[in-house]
Image (spheres, coloured by chain):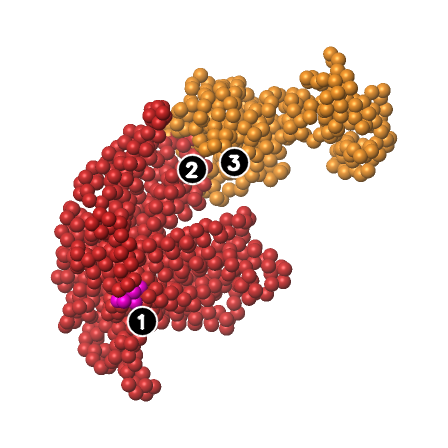
Amino acid sequence: MASVKIENLSISYGKTSVLENISLEINSGEFFFLLGPSGCGKTTLLRSIAGLGQSPSDGKIFIGEEDVTTLPAWKRTAPMVFQSYALWPHMTVLKNVMYGLKERKVPEKESHERAYEVLKKVKMDEYALRRPSELSGGQQQRVALARALVIEPKLILLDEPLSNLDASLRVEMRYELRKIHDQSGLTMLYVTHDQEEALSMADRIALMNRGNIEQIGSPVELFRKPVSKFAAAFMGKINSIPGIIKSVDEKYVTVSTTLGDFTADFKGDFKQSQEVEICIRPGDINSGVKDFNCFSAKCMSSFFYGGQTEHLVESGDTVLHVLSEENITSDDFYVEKERIMVFSK
Amino acid sequence: MICRFLMKNRSVAIHILRFFIYLTALIPGFGLYIRLLTLGVFFFLGFIAEKNIFSLIRDSILVFLAVFLFYPIIFILREGFFDQGHFTLSFLFSIFENPLTRNAIGTSFTLAIITVIISFIISVPLAYFTVKSSFSGKAFLAGLILLPLILPPFVGAIGARQLLARFGTVNLFLMNIGIISSPIDFLGQNKFWGVAILQSLHLFPIMYLNVVSALANVDPNLEDAARNMGTPPLGIFRKILMPLSAPGVFAGSIIVFIWAFTDLGTPLVFEYREVVPLLIFDRISDMGDNPEGFALVVMVMLISLASYSISRIFLKKHDTSMLSKNRSSAREWKPPFIAALFIRTLFIIVIVISILPHLAVILTSFSGKWFMTPLPETLTTSHYSTALSHELTVPSITNSIIYATIATVLDLILGIGLAWLVSRSKKASARYLDILAMLPLALPGIVIAFGYLASFNGSFLDPRKDAMWILIFAYSVRRLPYILRSAHAGFSQVNDSLEEAAVNLGSSQTKALRTITLPLITSNLVAGGILVFCFAMLEVSDSLILALKTNSFPITKAIYVLMGRVDDGLATACALGVWSMVFLGISLMLANSILGKKMGELFR
């Protein structure tokens, strides 16, 4: 299986630069996610690995050991699942899937067998002779996947493959994609703007923002130890409260806010009296009394989601979101030290 | 310092060099061979500098346009603005000082405006019912509306002359039933109106197509929103449809204006000599000594280009068709029986009136003896066999088919290449090239024909020697925009990612184009090709001006020459006209059924 290495890659369209000096290493067999808001350059990065779109103004791209930076797209083996699926409307499902094999001069009979095999794997063998227009979105998605898988690549690129599916199907396809990855051991590079998709499926995630990589790490690292407020907010809902650094010691940093003092187990370059923000995820605010990180607030309204309930609680002018499993009975709340994030303003 | 910069940026240096080489190739005065050689150097330098398919396509089109579009234009401009090497406006002024030319300009202008107004009045109700209502037979009637486009107006004019003559069908009929006692002089004092009405009857389908596509482009959701706010149907037409379709309608009007302003055929048959195209036609024989012809052509060209630019800018500024993402398909109103009958009648009346001249052509083509009676006394089919065996007509039919076929193939190659370039390469240069290749839409045939005759004088393309290739190039330059538009429409319907997916799986760019995109846009290409072929077959001004030798005559020129012959020349001309009418009618209806409502966008 192939690793992907990107060295100091820059891409610009005219004067607007889309990617700035990106370096990234994706291990062989990894399920790697490029995550970010729209316009952050994640799709441009993915397409540059396939050799599509604007060619890089600077930097290098390696697939495995091979430097593919100047290799034309059609000479690379990095099949892509397009966001729009890009199934050719004038060919049957089977023809679509066999296309890549034909380009690789695989004999007709063998490519026929391989195509059926792959279509069976994605449960689309019954539809082999249909046209793409006769298929539902989910079925088209499977065919697009089969078309990429059939050439037995070492690397597969997926450009927001689930974004055109409806919600329940989208969740179901996550399991299937993960299964395909685990069974094949393929290197898969997946672009999405949906942080839930990334958190649930990825081995590692590169979070991108405005043409730069904000942070690379495992889903848990990104969720728990984000390097910036942007990363923290992008990975999930946060409550942020402004404050001033009261004291810093080797392990803890203490911030004083309108809700009182909070001590956090969070690494960062902080100085006394610096203006900061503390960020707490709604699920990390617990009901009850502790001798640290404690505050009282009044519950204003509750939203029941089935398994969990979200409460809006008010303390002075500050409104916080609290996620809990049952109804809140007391007005007292606390947060564990390792669940508080601190970012300089 | 500049030198160092150029050394560093070799490709910039080559591009600058190439630009100057290209300009050199456009300087009038060099022979055609030197010009082609220079352009060859330009092409070769581009090939070694870039070596990609995009630059190859771009340069081929640039070379083609240089020889057959820019150079003739520059030649005309030089002759119109330079007197023995000195810049002068006196030629241009003199055509406004000379009462003959001044009056002709005024007449042509009024004629074109009147034509636009009449075609507008005819088209709007028809277009509205085509887009907004559904009744049985609509597709058929909408196809028939295009019939007038299928014959060169000057053949229709032959029929009209037959109908409206002092002792022609109309006068004799009116006299026979006792409405008038003496014949009305349609073709004498009132020639102006005769020509205006005939031009309108010929050109209104272009207006109709434009209004249809402009109306179809208005998102029905916008109308629903207005309806929802309490606007009655007429208010919706006035407040929503009219303003939103105005740019498209305006663009159509400009095309009709340019065509009417520069139409040679109709006034020629009516012998209405006081219009600009005829003055130009008359100045062709002495173009060498008399700059007046050039000055008139320059004036026509400037007016056409100016009005075309205005319509482009207007269209671009007010382009609202792409505003809303979730368009719903047009909601069609199903009229009750009586209303549907009324709409159908309206269509039929317009169709009948507009093809009356053509019916007269058919009648003439069958006429044996026809003198002082409303209808011919005897009928015969002999003219049809004459038309297919006459020494003048047989070669002209073969010629026209050969010319039109080669021109169509040439246009398909250039048009597909350029359209692909424009839709797939994101470079601004491709868009400018597209604008340049669309220019011929604004250049009247008479300008191009005049320019060719003057600028290729003495070269191996000189029409005085053999008109075949020059006519082919004239046809293909003038009709390139149609292929370009229809191919471009096709390419923009095919999502980029379809081609990318093929490249991603190992196809080269050209193979992806061949196996994926071209099969998907075949219908657009076929339709565009049919249009080009039709228009090449019935081209008037290029054919009349450039075909100088009998053996290279295309059909239209043969008809024109036959018309002037005594005996049964007129009837034979009409028979030949009918043959081409049948042929072109089939082709055009085919194109319409393939392209549907999009056809109007080809005429902008």
From the image, tell me which residue sits under label 2: B426
**Residue at figure coordinates x 24%, y 70% from the top left:** B271
Chain B display color: red
**Residue at figure coordinates x 25%, y 39% from the top left:** B24
Q: Quadrant of the C terminus of chain A?
A: top right
From the image, tell me which residue sits under label 1: B192
Instruction: Tell me whether the residue at label 3 lies in contact with that at label 1, contact meaning CB atoms closer than 8 angstroms.
Output: no
Looking at the picture, how far across and down is residue B530, in whole percent? 31, 53
- Kindly state the secondary structure of the residue where label 2 is placed: loop
Instruction: Report the span colored magenta.
Output: B99-105
User: Residue under mark 2: which chain is it in?
Assistant: B
Q: Which mark, by number, is residue B354?
A: none
Q: Would you place residue B411 above or below residue A197 in this image?
A: below
> Residue type at mark 3?
Gln
**Residue at figure coordinates x 20%, y 70% from the top left:** B571
> Residue type at mark 1?
Phe
- Apparent side of residue A283 relative to residue B104 in the rendered image (left or right): right
Asked where in the image residue B362 lies, by quadrant, the reply is bottom left
Specify whether disc 2 shares its chain with disc 1. yes
Q: How many residues crowd around disc 1 within 10 Å: few (fewer than 14), some, or many (20 or more)?
A: many
- Mark 3 vs mark 1: give the one in front: 1
Residue B101 painted magenta = yes
